[in-house]
Amino acid sequence: IEACWLFSLHYSQLEVVVHPQSVIHSMVEFTDGTTLAHLSAPTMNVPLAHALGWPNRLTTSVSSIDLIKVGQLTFEALDEDLFPALGLARWAQNQGGTACVTLNAANEEAVAAFLAGKLNFLQIYSVIEDALVHVPVIQDQSMDNILGTDGLARRRARTHIQLLNTTVCV
């Protein structure tokens, strides 16, 4: 979604590749057939600093990548059965309007619940899907609609997380 917004691309112009070492944060293929990659330690701190500081470079506390320690870079085709959330992102991107706001807000709530031990990893998808189903998409992306959708999606996500944590006694 970010690449589509930042570079005015349609998601059909992007290819998702699984890279288990998590040191390549992006790759761009040029018309001459060359590919440039952005490599750094497996944390989002450097790519975010790169984006926020553009065109300058910000100093981070992240240590340099040790390519000898990494050893090798491997790539795998995306298995959409193993990574179903990508389908949700594509759906939201296709809907336009505030759908991506809903996806982001629900994801942030689900990940926070996961990190707090209130949700298991595989339930993150369910929380996002539920929010996308129940929060209406508004095509007018005014700041009021964006903020309103964000709040509604977060409330819906928190409600769904609570529902997932409720056990039924028989």
Image (cartoon, rainbow, N blue to C red):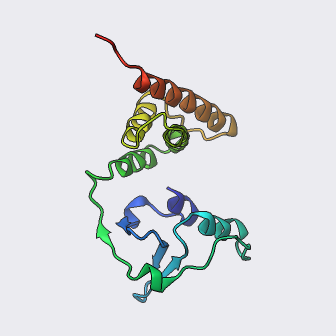
| Residue 30, horizontal then vertical, whole percent | 45, 83
Total numbered circles: 0
| Residue 71, horizontal then vertical, whole percent | 40, 82
Please tell me which residue lies in front, 88 or 126.
126
Q: Name which residue lies at 67% across and 67% down.
A: 49
| Residue 128, horizontal then vertical, whole percent | 44, 38
Horizontally, is 122 left or right of 28 in the view? left
Q: Name which residue lies at 42% across and 89% down.
A: 32
Residue 167, by quadrant, is top left
Please tell me which residue lies in front, 90 or 16.
16
Q: Name which residue lies at 38% across and 37% down.
A: 123
Residue 101, by quadrant, is top right
* Quadrant in which the C terminus is drawn: top left
- Please determine whether, in this image, residue 105 is positioned above or below residue 164: below
Q: Name which residue lies at 54% across and 58% down.
A: 2
| Residue 40, horizontal then vertical, whole percent | 55, 75
Horizontally, is 95 left or right of 49 in the view? left
The furthest residue to the top: 170
- Please determine whether, in this image, residue 170 is positioned above or below residue 140: above
